[in-house]
Image (cartoon, rainbow, N blue to C red):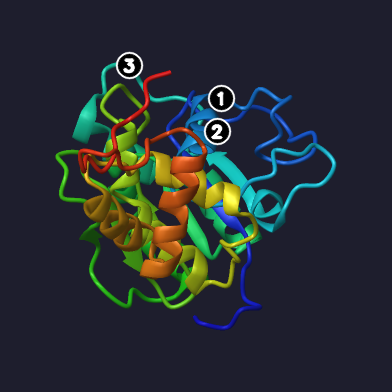
Amino acid sequence: MQNADLTGTILVVTLPGQGAVGELPTHYFNPNSKQGKIRDALSRWFSIWGIPLTHSVNHPNAIEKAMHEVPWCDQVPEHLHGPQTVRYYADNAGAVIDAVTRLRPRIIFVLSAYLFDAMASDSVAPQIQAVIGRAKMPAHRITQMRLKALHQEFENAHIIVLPTPSKNTTDEYVASLSAPVRQCFTQVGFNLSETSDSLLSAARALIVIDESRTIEKLQNQLRINRQRAQALFEELVEDGMVSAPDAKGVRYALQRK
């Protein structure tokens, strides 16, 4: 899993009615195409995670070109809600099984715990694992915050389970997922250091009102060394996000714009 040439495709699995509609005109993160609430949320979340995107129509980077999305199914009967939907999803998993078989993704984002439960069901799991291999570990939580997010590594892929975007998926919550999400991308060979702008954008979401704590948080959440974290902090100062130490010894304060 450490070979830098592995990369491969990235598949986003969404609830019915929340994902992209129709063929992608160029690539998943093309800002000129309307691809649904999940794509719009992920565009921001990737920025918070420090995962570089160009948003270029004609010159997408490797990550943008690797992205694909599939709604689990067309619709769910109105009388089914919450956990009741899992059995229905398991019985109507054809589109997802086909996408996994065709694309052979190295990273699968599943935008609902109920979809993940359906993916792990007795009828669906063998067909998915025929492509991604057996699980190397149990699914485990990747944030200490209230909303559940999970990661599970398989022989040929990583599955990351995220909540559907809502008012509760705050920037602070999304930032708490940075380290494990970035680690998945680097494990399958994607280069997350294409631009300093991507890390700088992620750094903005991790500021706390203490320089040493901010630098430590940048190190831990972005999986970078202290020297790079210090340099990012100094860029934040230069960018006007924080102020430099004053004569009274106050380290810095957020700049309100």
Would you call the spot at circle 2 few (<14 residues within 10 Å), some (14-19), or many (20 or more)?
many
Q: Amino acid at mark 3?
A: Glu
Q: Earlier in the sequence, mark 3 or mark 2?
A: 2
38 over 78 or under it: above or below? below
Residue 128 coordinates in the image, percent (x, y): 45, 62
SS of the residue under disc 2: helix
**Which residue lies under the disc numbered 3?**
78
> In this rendering, which labeled residue sits more in front, label 3 or label 1?
1
**Which residue lies under the disc numbered 2?**
39
Would you call the spot at circle 1 few (<14 residues within 10 Å), some (14-19), or many (20 or more)?
few
| Residue at image coords 34%, 41% | 174
Residue 137 coordinates in the image, percent (x, y): 27, 74
Quarter-of-image position of residue 122: bottom left
Residue 92 coordinates in the image, percent (x, y): 44, 41
What distance separates the C-alpha of mark 3 from that of mark 2? Answer: 25 Å
Q: Amino acid at mark 2?
A: Arg
